Amino acid sequence: MTDSREREVTQAFVSLASHLANGYDVVDLLNDLTVDCARLLDIASAGLLLADGRGVLHVMAASSERTRQLEVFQLQRAEGPCRDCFLERAAVSVPELVAESARWPQFVPAALEAGFASVHALPMRFRDSVLGVLGLFGTTVGALRPEDLTLGQALADVASVALVQDTAATDRTAVNEQLQTALTSRVVLEQAKGVLAQRGELDMPQAFVVLRQFARDHNLRLTKVAQEIVSRALSAEAVLEHARAKSQSRS
Amino acid sequence: MSGIDRLRAELGAAMAGAASALDAANSLCHACVDLLEVDGASISLMDHGSSRGTFGSSNELSRRLDSLQYTFGEGPCLDAVRDGRPVLATDLSDPSEQRWPAFRDAMLESGVCAVFALPVAVASSYVGALDLFRSRRGHLTDEALAGGLLAAELAALPLLDLMTADLDWDGVAQGDSGWEHLASLERVEVYQATGMIMGATGMGPSEALVRLRAHAYARGETASEVAWAVVERRLLLDADDWSPQP
């Protein structure tokens, strides 16, 4: 590990630990975690898929807010390395996607179309169960280095801890309730991005940046801001205006 | 197949071949009585203007009991929708059960000792509830409760249809299992497009999803196809057909 990478990894874990200790918004934290993955590991894009109470995988967080990239993650509800990882409860490495089109006839063409060439799927373990999957997507063919896989698994485990906030929650019903709350927060975030995209003529990644900027500058949780935009307790114009003022003051 | 897998499959198939949204809701309620150790079931819709009320039941008594909550202005189903979480009353005859006195007395007179109200969500907002009635007091088994929560997820489908005033029932994909139908709406692009319709029209999330679906049915497209067209701005949102119903 080079010195600068070691420093980056340390910073990422210090930041995650600080959020876990001091209260956090689960959607925000998991988004940061996927961005950390994309930066620290030799991959282009990372996504977290979370299983609901009936074992269906949903997109929980991703390093890119581009809708087409979210779609590649979402597709794995039906088939793909992340789904197999969840069902088999073990890591799935696909160093060369193009060689696997018979195994996943729908997923592989979509992933190739989005520019991906390799995938590594790591289980989000929690005690004796698997809550979801961390998917690491590369734009080049090849396996991840062992140290990258180890680091990726550590980040996947941090994600599990963050999701099951109350680690005293022993029974599966309480854990499921936490996961469902997190998934609903993600739905509301997508709806709020849609509202901002429409009102501000933005694309989805821009809408996400505007929303998160507003939350951070006002010391509010991302989920709370998204909920208030959707319920119209907070006007989309106020959020868009804040972003405009901010960009003017920068220029 | 484990017990819960069997319940999931049977509940998912319960609404296939229904002749209308109301028929689908009734079928789901009948399946609850058959599968979940309860004596009655009903589905109600709230927060949708004048069309709030009970819209599906396993029998006349369940329908009447459910509707009483609107008459009295109190009841577990109203609480479940307001708080967005299940409300379980395991013994209405217990003197310490004081949450809904008028509703409780009416239930006991009809021989119902336990009621389980499970909220139903559409596009992340709670729009109704599935109520399960039982003459015997006590908790549901874990499996019956898990099955009830599955049924409450499925109940979103007939409620969505009931919220669609101009629904052409022939266009609804009745051959699909309920789970496939739900999965077709649980998609990132559908959530985003719902948000864009909200931004363009001022509707709430459930109403915006209703309009998106109605648009898809009218064109013989899937919700996902319409959602992509909205997100990629191939389908503009200022057209009249996105406006709220008169």
Image (cartoon, rainbow, N blue to C red):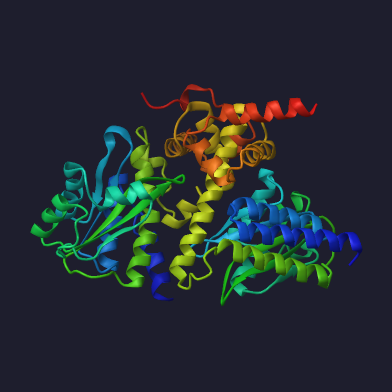
Vertical position of residue B229 compared to residue B41: above or below? above
Looking at the rendering, in which quadrant would you find the N terminus of chain B? bottom left
Q: Residue furthest left?
A: B109
User: A198 above or below B107?
Assistant: above
Give the farthest residue toward the right. A2
Residue A45: % across, % down: 75, 54
Residue B77 x, y percent position in the rendering: 27, 51
Q: How many numbered badges does the structure rendering display? A: 0
Any part of residue B43 in sight:
no
Q: Residue at x 23, y 50 (%)?
A: B75
Q: Position of residue A90 (x, y in %)?
A: 66, 74
Residue A48 appearing in the image: yes
- In terms of depth relative to the viewer, which is nearer, A204 or B244? A204
Q: Is residue B160 left or right of residue B198?
A: left
| Left or right, residue A209 beside residue B34 | right
Q: Nearer the viewer, residue A210 or A183?
A: A210
Q: Residue at x 17, y 44 (%)?
A: B72
**Apparent side of residue B93 relative to residue A156 in the rendered image (left or right):** left
Q: Residue at x 48, y 69 (%)?
A: A169
**Where does the C terminus of chain B fall, quadrant-wise?**
top left
